[in-house]
Amino acid sequence: MSKAKEDSILSVTDLSICFKTRNGLTKAVKSVDFEIARGETLAIVGESGSGKSVTCYSLLGLIPQPPGVIESGTAQFTTEEDKRDLLSSDKATLRSLLGDKIAVIFQDPMTCLNPYLTVGEQLIEPLCQHKNQSRSQARERAIELLEEVGIKDAETRFGSYPHEFSGGMRQRVMIAMALITEPELLIADEPTTALDVTIQAQILELLDRLKKQRNIALIFISHDLSVVASIAERVAVMRAGEIVESGDTQQIFQQPQHPYTQQLLASVPSGPKPRQSFQPGPADQPLLRVEHLKTVFQGSSAGLFAPRPPATIAVDDVSFELRHREVLGLVGESGSGKSTLGRSVIQLIKPTAGSVSLDGQELTQLRPKQLKPLRQRMQMIFQDPYASLNPRMTVFDTLAEPLLYHRIAKRKNISAQVLALMDDVGLAHADIRKYPHEFSGGQRQRIAIGRAIATKPELIIADEPVSALDVTIQAQILDLILALVERHNLSMLFISHDLSVVRSIADRVLVMHHGKLVESGATEALWAAPSAAYTRSLLAAVPHL
Amino acid sequence: MARFILMRLLQAIPVLLVVITVTFFLVRLAPGGPFSAEKAVPAEVLKALEARYQLDQPVIYQYFSYLGDLAHGDFGPSFKYPGRSVNEMIAAGLPATAELGLYAMCFALLIGASAGIIAALKPNSAQDYIPMSTAMLGICLPSFLLGPLLMLVFGVWLEWVPVSGWGDIPGDKILPALTLASGYTAYIARLSRGGMLEVMSQDYIRTARAKGLPEWKVVLKHGLRGGMIPVIAFIGPAFAGLLSGSFVVETIFQIPGLGRFYVQAAFNRDYTMIMGTTVLFATLIILFNLLADIVAVWLNPRLRDLYRSGGA
C-alpha cells in the first residue's frame, strides 16, 4: 500500500453503483475503495456477477446509464499534467482521456474488434483522434507496434480484417490498439479467458513485458486465480459488489484472511484425483473400444453456386479404450477435435470411418432405430447447461422424459423416481416445478447431469461440463461427478481444455492435437513425465497458484 | 466474384424462361382476346386481324415464334395500338417510371434510414416512438389515400409544390416520389432501427467508445455498416416493387409512365404489351436482387473472402 500512496495514478473511494431493474434497484457495487500506483499491476478477482467489470467500466463511463446509476464515489486520476475525478468529469473530458491516457483490453477479441473495418483502420483510430496525427504517421506507428506485439508481416497484415487473424493474434492486435497512444493506465478485462492455455501464456508474458517497459499501471480483471498469481503484484478479491480482501499477491494467496478468499483458493483444482477408486483388472474387457475413428466435415456451400469450402478432418485416426468404471480425460485446445470425437463416439455425428464398439457391439453400422436401446446406456453432458436444457420444460419434465421414453419408469410412480434423481444430484425437492432460467449455473448443470444419469447409463461423455461455471461451483460439480461415478459404477469420457480440472478427476488422460491423439497415459505418470512435445508445452503453459 | 456474378446471370435464364412461359399461356387462357371489345367486330375483320398478328396459328407455334423474336430483343407489335411496337411504348414509358422509382428509392433510403438510426440511438424513448409510429402510419396508409392527401396539403393549401405533371414545373416530381416512397420508407426505418439496435449492442461498439471516439463517429463509422445490412438486402426487392407498383401513383399524378400501360394492357388483353412489360420487370427484379447481393457481399469482408477464394 505504501507504494500506492506515493505514486498513485488512480484512487477510487466509496464507489457504489446500482442498476434499475424491474424488481427495483440492484446494488452491483457497494462502497468499493482501491488504489493503484504507476507501474503496478492490481488484479481484481471475483466470480461472475461480483461487480469487478462494472466497477472498472463505471470509471470510464462505459456502463449504460440508465439502467446503471452511480450512487456515490470519487475516482482520482492523476496524470503527469493534472489531476481529476473521473466520476464527476463530463463526457467530453472523459472522452479525451479514454483511448489516450486510459486504455482498455476486452475479453473476447473475436467480438471486440469491428468485423467490417480493417485491423489497421481500427488501430490508428486512437492516434488520429487524440494525437492529431495524420493517417500516414499513425500507420507507421501502428505497424511498428504490431511488430512489437509479435505480429509477423505487419505491413501486409495492417490491411487485413479481424476474421483473418486467429484468436491469439486478435488479442495481440487488441493490445497494440490499447498501447498505441502510450496510455498511463491500462484496464484488461479477462484478456486471456477466451484463449487456449498455450496462447494465454504467451499473451500474459507479452502484457507483462510491455507493461514493465512502459511503466504502465495495469488493472487486471479476472476470475482465474492461477492467472492472477502469475501477473499481479496486488490483489483485490470481490464478492457480491464488495472488496472482501485486498493486499499483496503473496500474502493473499498464502495467508488468505477472509473466508471467501479461502474458499476460492480451495476451489481451484490442483493436484491429482482425490480418491483412486479405479483399479483396472488385468483381463478386463473394455467398455468402449474406438479404433481408427475418423470424422470429416464436408464444408457446406453458402448457396447453389457459391464456392464450397474445403473439407476439414476433425478427428484423424483415433484409437483408444475406456475400461469399466474408469474416468478417461480428453484434453486439447479449441479446434483440436475433442468435442467432435466425443460426439462421434456417441453417434451424434456419424463418423466417416473407423469403428466404435460398446461392450463388444459395433455402433457405427447401426440404424437410428437399432441405436435407441443403446442410447440408454450412453449419455452426454454438455458444456452450457443453459443452452442444452429446454427452456420450456420444468425440472420434472426434463428428468421424466428419458425415464418414460426408455420405459424405465411407469407413469404412476414417475414422481418418486424423479425425486430420487433430484436427491442424487443434490437438487431440492421444492424446485421440481421450476424452469431452467430460475436456477443458477451450477444448479442447471446438476439438472443436466440428472438427465444424463436418469437412464442408468454405463458410459457418460461429459463435454466441458464445468467450463462455464465459477470456480467454487466448479469444485462442487466435480465432487458431484466423482461421487456419482462411484455410486453408479459409471465410466466416463471427460472432455476439457482445462488441464488442472482433468488432472483432478481423471484416471487416465488422452491428449489431442489437430485431430490426432498425441499422447495417452495414466494421469499422474503423464503429468510427471509427458513424452510428446505438445503435451510438454501444454503443461508448461498452465498457470499455477 | 466475377464467377459469382456470371453464375447468377446464368441462373436468371431459366427463371426468365419460366416467367415468360407461364405468362404467355396464362394470358391466352384468360377469357376474351385483344379484339373482343364491347363493339362487335365483323367476322372477316377479326379474321384478318388475327391472321396479321398470327393469332390464327396454333398457340405452341405462337409461343416459339415469340421466343424467337424475344431472343432478338423484339417484343413485337402492340395489339391495341396499331402501328406502335411494344419496344417503342416501353421506351416511351420506362424513363418516367425509372426516374420516379429512383427518386422514391432515394427518399425512402434517406428518410427511412435516418429515422431508423435516430430511433435506435435511444430505444424506448420519445426519440424512438415518434419516428416509429410515423413509420407505422406510412405502412398503413395506401398510396391512393396518401397521394391525394399530400396534394391537398402541400399543393392546394400550402401551395409549396405543384399537384401534378411530370417535368413541366420544377418540383412537380417531389409529391409523386414521396407518395410512392412512403411504404418503403416506413419499412426501411423499421429495418434500420432493428439493424442498428443489434449492432449498437455489440462488443466492438464498446471498444470504439473505449477509444474515446465521439458518439457520432461511433455510430457512423462503427455502427452503420453492420446496421445497414438488412436494409441493403431489402433494396433489391424494394426497387422491383417501386417499378412495378408505380401504377397507382402514376395514375394519381398523371405521369406518362410504364405502369399505366401495364395495367391498361392487362385489361385490354394486349398480349404482347403484357408480355413485354412482364419480361422487362422480371429482368429488372432479377438484376436489382443481384445488385443488392453484390453490395451485401462487398460490405461484409467475411463474405468477400469466401467469394474471392472460391470464385474469380
Image (cartoon, helix red, strand yellow):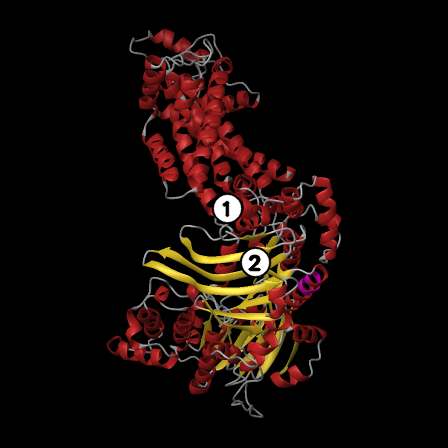
Q: Which amino acid type corresponds to the residue marked 1 in the rendered image?
A: Asp
Whether B230 is drawn above or below A505: the answer is above
Q: Quadrant of residue A452?
A: bottom left
Task: Give the class, few, some or many, for how many residues have Cα within 10 Å of label 2's Cα (few <14, many ≥20).
Answer: many
Magenta span of residues: A207-211
Mark 1 on the same chain as mark 2: yes
Q: Is residue B268 visible?
A: no
Taking the image as shown, residue A219 lies to the left or right of residue A147, namely left
Task: Please tell me whether the stretch drawn in magenta is mainly helix, strand or loop.
Answer: helix
Give me the residue at 38% from left, 77% from top.
A454
Judged from the image, the secondary structure of the residue bearing numbered disc 1 is loop
Is A115 covered by the magenta stretch?
no
Q: Nearer the viewer, residue A169 or A96?
A: A96
Q: Nearer the viewer, residue B6 or A528?
A: A528
Q: Which amino acid type corresponds to the residue marked 2 in the rendered image?
A: Asp
Q: Nearer the viewer, residue B26 or A35?
A: A35
Q: For residue A108, which numbered disc appears in the image?
A: 2
**Could you say where residue A230 lies in the image, as x and y percent from the top left?**
64, 72
**Could you say where residue A117 lies in the image, as x and y percent from the top left?**
61, 44
Mark 1 lies on residue = A90
Q: Quadrant of residue A403?
A: bottom left
**Quadrant of the image for the C terminus of chain A?**
bottom right
